[in-house]
Image (cartoon, helix red, strand yellow):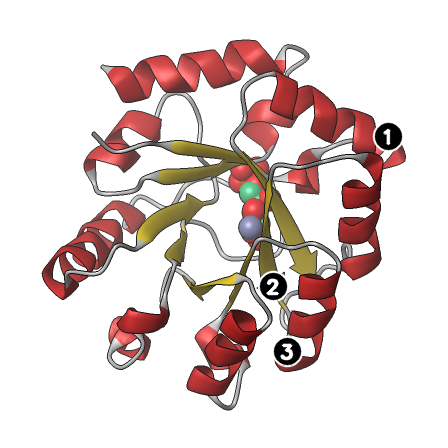
Amino acid sequence: MTKYLIAPSILSANFAKLGEDVDAVLAAGADVVHFDVMDNHYVPNLTIGPMVCEALRKHGVTADIDVHLMVQPVDDLISQFAKAGATYISFHPEATQHLDRSLQLIIDSGCKPGLVFNPATPLHYLDDVMHKLHHILLMSVNPGFGGQSFIPHSLDKLKKIRALIDSSGFDIRLEIDGGVKVDNIRAIAEAGADMFVAGSAIFNQSDYSQVIDQMRAELAN
Ligand code: DX5
Ligand code: ZN
């Protein structure tokens, strides 16, 4: 059976107490820490960089850190995040000049590569790179901000990506990011996702374990 992974997005965490908040969400049962990097260029918002990733590792976080680069250009930050302790690194294909080179940089730096698709980014970017991917991340909102509503068409796009993965024969995780809540996570899983980013749905509640338990209960049904 598929192992579903829940990856809280720390974009909605308390940045003034980030280490404690990450500890709390992991203790509440989260599998992976989703780390949103925004550059005020590729997206209209500015967040956190490699120093914060390194600080979380020094704080003692041992869970996988899933770095989602919403930056342009891409390549400079790959080795910096690898050195800072990233586990997975993904980027948006239209943000790099040389897709294969950027993926190979991630692999060569010892991290697991992913490609991110916005709601309207065409899937042809996958044509010649499936064999290199650890995960595909589908954005179910336009990137840049937490707390947006899930775009319903994403379910159709998820199904298309799931079919591509299954026909490729490669073992590639399918991650969904944006507007994931307790009340839609099951439909999202049924459309083919096996890794779920959730920011506001988790961090805006006082009891993280309650939300995560509810999500797992939905996934088990
Ligand atoms: C948006 C980010 C997401 C975001 C998700 O650009 O990539 O990871 O934080 O937040 P929610 O779950 O609140 O939609
Ligand atoms: Zn993200």
Q: On residue 69, which mark appears? A: 2
Label 1 neighbour load within 10 Å: few <14, some 14-19, many 20+: few
Q: Dot 3, crowdedness within 10 Å: few (<14), some or many (≥20)?
A: many
Q: Mark 2: few, some, or many residues within 10 Å (few <14, many ≥20)?
A: many
Tell which circle, 2 or 1, labels the residue nearer the N-terminal end.
Answer: 1
Give the percent coordinates (x, y) of residue 87.
Answer: 58, 53
Tell me: residue 102, above or below residue 136.
Answer: below
Please state if 172 lies on the left or on the right of 107 as rendered.
left
Location of residue 191 in the rendering, given as x and y in whole percent from the top left corner = 21, 41
Instruction: Give, as a three-letter code, the residue at label 3.
Output: Gln
Q: Nearer the viewer, mark 1 or mark 3?
A: 1
Q: Residue at x 42, y 12 (%)?
A: 214
Q: Position of residue 95 (x, y in %)?
A: 54, 79
List x then y, in percent, for residue 9: 60, 39
Count of labels in the image: 3
- Residue 45 is at least partly visible in this image: yes
- Mark 2 → mark 1, Cα distance in angstroms: 22 Å
Give the residue at x 81% y 32%: 19
Quadrant (top left, top right, bottom left, bottom right) of the C terminus: top left
Residue receiving disc 1? 17
The three-letter amino acid code for the residue at tag 1 is Lys
Of the image marks 1 and 3, the number of the one nearer the N terminus? 1
Based on the displayed image, in which of its 4 quarters is residue 3 positioned? top left
